[in-house]
Image (tube, helix red, strand yellow):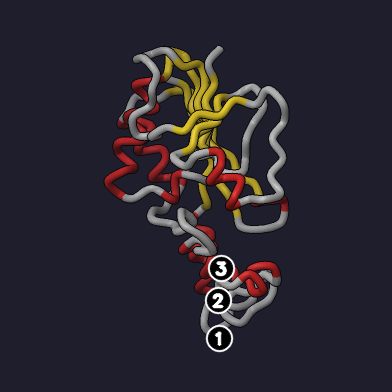
């Protein structure tokens, strides 16, 4: 079976060909504590032009990745996934629930304290606009970073957003079937994510 993990960054999965636009050396520099298990496969490639034949891939994953693609890249990415998947192949992906994030942001306190910082000390202390926690009490803390991306390094900006309705429309447009959608908390305690399982 050919199984791909797109935009893997530091989330290399066993049993998958882990694909990222960055080299493995660049990923290790960005995530110095990353442990790579023996036998894990990695491929540096453009995820918008996968080096696989039409209808040749059994499964494609994209976890917490597609929100980093621009509006133009979104269409290319979905069509490329559909092209590469075998009939009956699975597309499994997760994205932040943008509707839930916006509701939380609107309900939160207006409490701006400081400018954003991305120095090592601030990053290690979870500094978000003067807030030092993952709390969603203030608009100008972790919630803003969750909407726009943490922006601590290249590639972390969020350029797009997803709701359940948008996902259903995209999957219908591309003729994905057997659509399953559920929600879960990112890292078990943070923002609400949408998890999707779609079959070609």
Task: Quadrant for residue 140, please give it.
Answer: bottom right
Q: Is 25 or 64 nearer to us in this picture?
A: 25
Q: Residue at x 48, y 65 (%)?
A: 102
The answer to which of marks 2 and 3 sits earlier in the sequence is 2
Q: Quadrant of the C terminus?
A: top left
Residue marked by disc 1: 114
Q: Residue at x 53, y 46 (%)?
A: 26
Q: Residue at x 54, y 41 (%)?
A: 94
Residue 136 in view in this figure: no
**Relative to residue 12, is residue 131 depicted above or below?**
below
Rendered location of residue 12, percent (x, y): 62, 35
Q: CA distance from mark 3 to mark 1?
A: 15 Å
Depth-wise, is mark 2 or mark 3 nearer the camera?
A: 2
- How packed mark 2 is, by other alpha carbons closer than 10 Å (few <14, some 14-19, many 20 or more), is some
Residue marked by disc 2: 117
Rendered location of residue 72, percent (x, y): 27, 46
**Relative to residue 84, is residue 113 depicted above or below?**
below
Q: Are marks 1 and 2 in contact (CB under 8 Å)?
A: yes
Query: What SS does tag 3 mark?
Result: helix
The answer to which of marks 3 and 1 sits earlier in the sequence is 1
Q: CA distance from mark 2 to mark 3?
A: 15 Å
Q: Residue at x 38, y 26 (%)?
A: 50
Task: Quadrant for residue 146, please give it.
Answer: bottom right
Residue marked by disc 3: 143
- How packed mark 1 is, by other alpha carbons closer than 10 Å (few <14, some 14-19, many 20 or more), is few
Query: What SS does tag 1 mark?
Result: loop
- How packed mark 3 is, by other alpha carbons closer than 10 Å (few <14, some 14-19, many 20 or more), is many
The answer to whether 166 appears left or right of 181 in the picture is: left
Q: CA distance from mark 1 to mark 2?
A: 9 Å
Furthest-left residue in this view = 72
Q: Is 164 or 154 nearer to us in this picture?
A: 154
């Amino acid at each position: 079976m050919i199984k791909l993990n797109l935009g893997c960054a530091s989330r290399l999965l066993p049993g998958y060909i882990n694909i990222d636009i960055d080299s493995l050396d660049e990923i290790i520099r960005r995530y110095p504590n990353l442990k790579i298990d023996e036998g894990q496969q990695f491929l540096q490639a453009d995820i918008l032009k996968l080096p696989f034949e039409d209808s040749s891939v059994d499964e494609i994953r994209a976890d917490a990745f597609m929100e980093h693609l621009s509006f133009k890249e979104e269409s290319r990415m979905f069509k490329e996934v559909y092209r590469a998947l075998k009939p009956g192949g699975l597309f499994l992906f997760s994205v932040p629930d943008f509707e839930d994030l916006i509701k939380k942001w609107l309900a939160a306190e207006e409490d701006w304290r400081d400018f954003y910082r991305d120095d090592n000390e601030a990053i290690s202390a979870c500094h978000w606009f003067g807030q030092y926690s993952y709390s969603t009490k203030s608009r100008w803390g972790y919630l803003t970073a969750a909407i726009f991306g943490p922006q601590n390094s290249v590639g972390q900006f969020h350029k797009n957003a997803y709701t359940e309705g948008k996902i259903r429309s995209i999957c219908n447009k591309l003729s994905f079937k057997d659509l399953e959608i559920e929600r879960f908390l990112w890292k078990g305690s943070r923002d609400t994510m949408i998890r999707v399982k779609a079959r070609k």
